[in-house]
Amino acid sequence: MPNNTFSIVTIISFLLIGMISGIILGPFFEKIGSDILLGVVVLLAIFMTYALVRVFVSRQRSILKKPDPPKAASQVGFVVDTFHDVVARLKEKELELEKLKTSAEEKAGSAEAYNENILQSVPSGVISIDNDLRIRSINHSAENILGITSSDTIGKQFSDVVKEPLSSIINEKQPLARIEYQYVTNDNRHIWLGITSSELLNGEAVKIGYTFVFSDLTDIKSLQVQVELKHRLSQLGEMSAGISHELRNSMSVISGYATLLGKKVEDTNKSTVESITSEIAHMDQIISELLAFARPSVLNREDIDLNNLIEKTLSSIKVDKKDIEISVHADSPVSVKADGLLLRQALSNLLINAAESMSGQGKIDITLKQLQDKAEITVRDTGCGIPEDIRQKIFLPFFSTKQDGTGFGLALVQKIIVSHSGSIEVDSREEQGTTFRVVLPLVS
């Protein structure tokens, strides 16, 4: 408004000036002439035009510098304030979503870690494999049972990591209920495994692989064998004691009569009497061994250094064949809580049997090593081996493949080992030698 008023006042002022100038100069212009009047009018017109342009330019500058009307300013401020409010709310929501995301990730990580802790803590071995039979995970129990490490197995084919019969089982891709198998680990332990396998499904129930779950049943199997053997030996002992008592009474009478007969017969018949006496002495030896076998073992347990025990046993036994080479391979000192006298007797019987199984040159290897909480003694020979049809009978009393054998050597070895809560196994092939493997608990 002020600019418009200024423009009108300016125009009116110019008109008034023009009128006054015309009145004053009118008589003068009549004398001078029309040309001069025209020039003056032109000058006034130019001056007025210049003044009007200046007014217009000034007015436009004022408009540009002038703030918006209050109503427009209010509308723009509302929009700006609303925009800022929306942005602030969005940032708040973004922070809330970020917190929810972090919380969800922490919960997921915690659940994953919890499940992983459960998997790693279970006593059973657990191995997961994909559809291509490549190992994807393995827990600590599986590593300890099979003698492998996760760093050497993850991503490898299952059949490249485990041995038979486990590799064949999983290659069939068939779920298995509880099945028991014997297995030789990577660190050469002979164990029993109880195995279960099943398909591994994802959240949509789609098969993505297999799970392989197994437990070490070696101790349970050994305990079963020990219980059965102790029960059988107890029954055999009771029966043997009764039979030995009756036989020894009769043999004492026969031996007495043979002695009297030897004094009265002629020299030509004395050889017959001596044969009778010799056979009676042999039978008495058998009865003594039978009684010793039947007698309950009373263990005098003490700390026994097995390395030292092996050395003493080798120095005490007599091997007539000088062409038999004996070597010992032992870990650092291995000690057990056991009866040293009985263990030495058992080891002597094994070494003597090994030497007698070789007719010519041969070799006996004795290996001692510690496997976790057990000690293992292995006696391996290069003898004639044991036929498969009699391999299961060698620990039975009275069973012997030797003409002059009593059949109590290996039976007594087994009894001694079992009385120490240990186990003994035999692996033999004809013309390929025999291996006896004795396992004893370090603390029993």
Image (cartoon, rainbow, N blue to C red):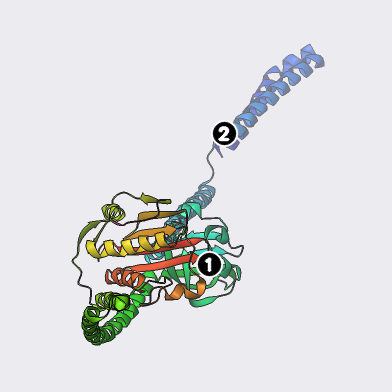
Q: Quadrant of the C terminus?
A: bottom left
Residue at the image point whose x is 41% and y is 55% from the top: 364
Q: Nearer the viewer, residue 354 or 160?
A: 354
Quadrant location of residue 422? bottom left
Label 1 residue SS: helix
Q: Which residue is mark 2?
A: 62
**Could one spot residue 275 in this view of the protein?**
no
Q: Nearer the viewer, mark 2 or mark 1?
A: 1
Identify the disc placed on residue 280. none
Quadrant location of residue 245? bottom left
Residue 410: percent from the left, percent from the top?
36, 70
Region of the chain picked out in magenta, as a range: 317-322
Amino acid found under the numbered disc labelled 2: Ser
Label 2 residue SS: helix
> Relative to 202, is 100 above or below?
above
Amino acid found under the numbered disc labelled 1: Leu
